[in-house]
Image (spheres, rainbow, N blue to C red):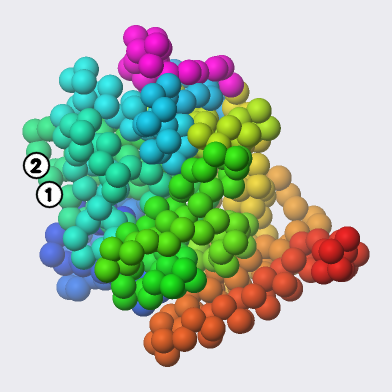
């Protein structure tokens, strides 16, 4: 049974989909690693095992099959799946654009779906009790625009607490999540007849972060993990480009601290600090099963605008109609599947092209992937980088847990800085590394 492999191999992403067929026989809890994980509490019947396996987004590769069922009438690209259009753009309302992570289009489209009556509620990540963030429900534009219900939240979440709502509600729902969570929702629609979700939006995902990612930022800025009350990962400032943003943390005492993201240990996404193990075996970067996918337009012509710009994929005629009907409220420009790839190129190279090597060198079961999407990597240098990135992810989680236990941030920072120096050596090569050290 693949679900057993998922749980035993620590590949479970804690989405909560298995709560639908298993009910109280499974619990989803936060682990010492800083990630949610399912735990089977009671013996399962054969039917329960089959159903749980069917809804798990990690246990099987289904993007091709489900994508064909959902969007088979559309054109197809191996880079982004089926699509009707790719565009770059942003909202024209400056306040809403500044208060978003990128161009503000994810929230804008959600608002329009509410306004037009296509949906009654939005299930998305926002402020939560008992955690910095978790899944919540918004029913109006005002709720969607609340500061702690917007923007990117690089933090583990689970929608298991909303399974009963999604199963029983008469609401028409928009679900927003990262690609694997959208995949879980599509599995629930197919295998558990969850028909409340009428639209699904995906956010482009670099990889899933543990609670340690936010706590690490806060601790560096003088707020202990036990005192971290809020974090804004994407604060825009004029004079900096869109990728050069700031982070603001808030303590339980209400005091805030802001630092430039690039100055913080662990900010380089390529290093993979606090990354979930399953992310190294995920090939869907474009949210291929979503009606629309939204990401940052990390393109030469867009990145200079500090206010942020989206690149987004439409796979639904309603999305295209909304663009046309409300075109005076947004700026959009035609783009392409190739541009989408370019905007996330480093992520594609690591996640897809590194797949065959990671599967080949794994010591046990790995999640099924579409290896045919990968371009074979023969470079021994690249292979060493892939191995070392996995070590960086592993040690960041392990050492941060140890640092919290002993209440000493230096236990984490000193070792991770040394590992970072060695990574730079592997990545740059001897000559370029020495030039960097010498400031040349």
Whether residue 92 is in magenta: the answer is no
- Residue 128 in the image: state x and y as whole percent: 22, 56
| 398 is higher (above) or lower (below) than 94 | below
- Residue 135 in the image: state x and y as whole percent: 25, 50
Q: How many labels sit on residues? A: 2
- Residue 86 in the image: state x and y as whole percent: 52, 23
Quarter of the image for residue 348 reads top right
Dot 2: within a 10 Å radius of its alpha carbon, few (fewer than 14), some, or many (20 or more) residues? few
38 lies left or right of 154: left
Which residue is painted at 42% across and 90% down in the image? 406
Tell me the SS state at disc 1: helix
Principal secondary structure, stretch drawn in magenta: helix
Which residue is painted at 60% across and 42% down in the image? 240
Dot 1: within a 10 Å radius of its alpha carbon, few (fewer than 14), some, or many (20 or more) residues? few
Start-end of magenta stretch = 316-335
Which residue is painted at 22% across and 30% down in the image? 141
Q: Tell me whether circle 1 and circle 2 mark residues in contact (CB < 8 Å).
A: yes
- Does the image show residue 437? yes
| 437 is higher (above) or lower (below) than 169 | below
Quadrant housing the N terminus: bottom left
- Does the image show residue 156? no
**Residue designated by label 1:** 164
- Residue 168 is marked as 2
Whether residue 331 is in magenta: the answer is yes
Quadrant housing the C terminus: bottom right
Quarter of the image for residue 340 reads top right
- Residue 60 in the image: state x and y as whole percent: 42, 51
Q: Residue furthest right?
A: 431
- CA gap between label 1 and label 2 equals 6 Å
432 lies left or right of 118: right
- Residue 11 is marked as none
């Amino acid at each position: 049974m693949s679900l057993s492999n998922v749980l035993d191999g620590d590949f479970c992403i804690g989405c909560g989909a298995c709560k639908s067929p298993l009910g109280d026989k499974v619990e989803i809890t936060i682990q010492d690693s800083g990630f949610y994980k399912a735990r089977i509490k009671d013996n399962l019947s054969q039917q329960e095992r089959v159903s749980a396996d069917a809804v798990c987004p990690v246990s099987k590769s289904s993007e091709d099959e489900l994508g064909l069922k959902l969007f088979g009438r559309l054109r197809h690209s191996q880079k982004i799946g089926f699509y009707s259009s790719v565009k770059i753009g942003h909202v024209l309302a400056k306040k809403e654009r500044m208060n978003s992570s990128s161009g503000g289009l994810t929230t804008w489209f959600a608002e329009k779906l509410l306004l037009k009556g296509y949906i009654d509620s939005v299930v998305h990540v926002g402020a939560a009790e008992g955690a910095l963030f978790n899944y919540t429900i918004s029913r109006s534009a005002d709720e969607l625009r609340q500061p702690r219900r917007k923007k990117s939240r690089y933090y583990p979440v689970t929608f298991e607490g909303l399974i009963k709502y999604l199963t029983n509600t008469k609401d028409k729902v928009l679900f927003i999540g990262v690609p694997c969570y959208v995949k879980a929702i599509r599995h629930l629609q197919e295998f558990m007849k969850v028909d409340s979700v009428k639209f699904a939006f995906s956010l482009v995902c670099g990889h899933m972060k543990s609670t340690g990612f936010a706590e690490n930022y806060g601790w560096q800025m003088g707020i202990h993990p036990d005192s971290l009350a809020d974090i804004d990962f994407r604060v825009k400032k004029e004079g900096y480009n869109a990728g050069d943003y700031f982070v603001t943390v808030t303590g339980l005492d209400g005091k805030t601290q802001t630092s430039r993201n690039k100055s913080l240990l662990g900010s380089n996404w390529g290093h993979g600090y606090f990354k979930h193990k399953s992310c190294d075996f995920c090939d869907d970067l474009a949210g291929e099963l979503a009606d629309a996918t939204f990401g940052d337009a990390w393109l030469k012509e867009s990145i200079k605008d500090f206010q942020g710009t989206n690149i987004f994929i439409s796979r639904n005629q309603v999305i295209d109609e909304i663009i046309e009907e409300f075109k005076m409220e947004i700026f959009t420009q035609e783009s392409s599947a190739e541009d989408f790839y370019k905007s996330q190129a480093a992520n594609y190279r690591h996640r897809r092209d590194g797949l065959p090597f990671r599967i080949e060198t794994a010591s046990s079961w790995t999640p099924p992937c579409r290896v045919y999407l990968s371009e074979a990597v023969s470079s021994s240098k690249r292979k060493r980088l892939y191995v070392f990135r996995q070590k960086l992810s592993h040690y960041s989680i392990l050492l941060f847990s140890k640092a919290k236990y002993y209440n000493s941030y230096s236990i984490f920072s000193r070792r991770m800085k040394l590992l970072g120096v060695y990574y730079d050596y592997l990545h740059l090569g001897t000559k370029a590394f020495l030039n960097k050290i010498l400031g040349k």
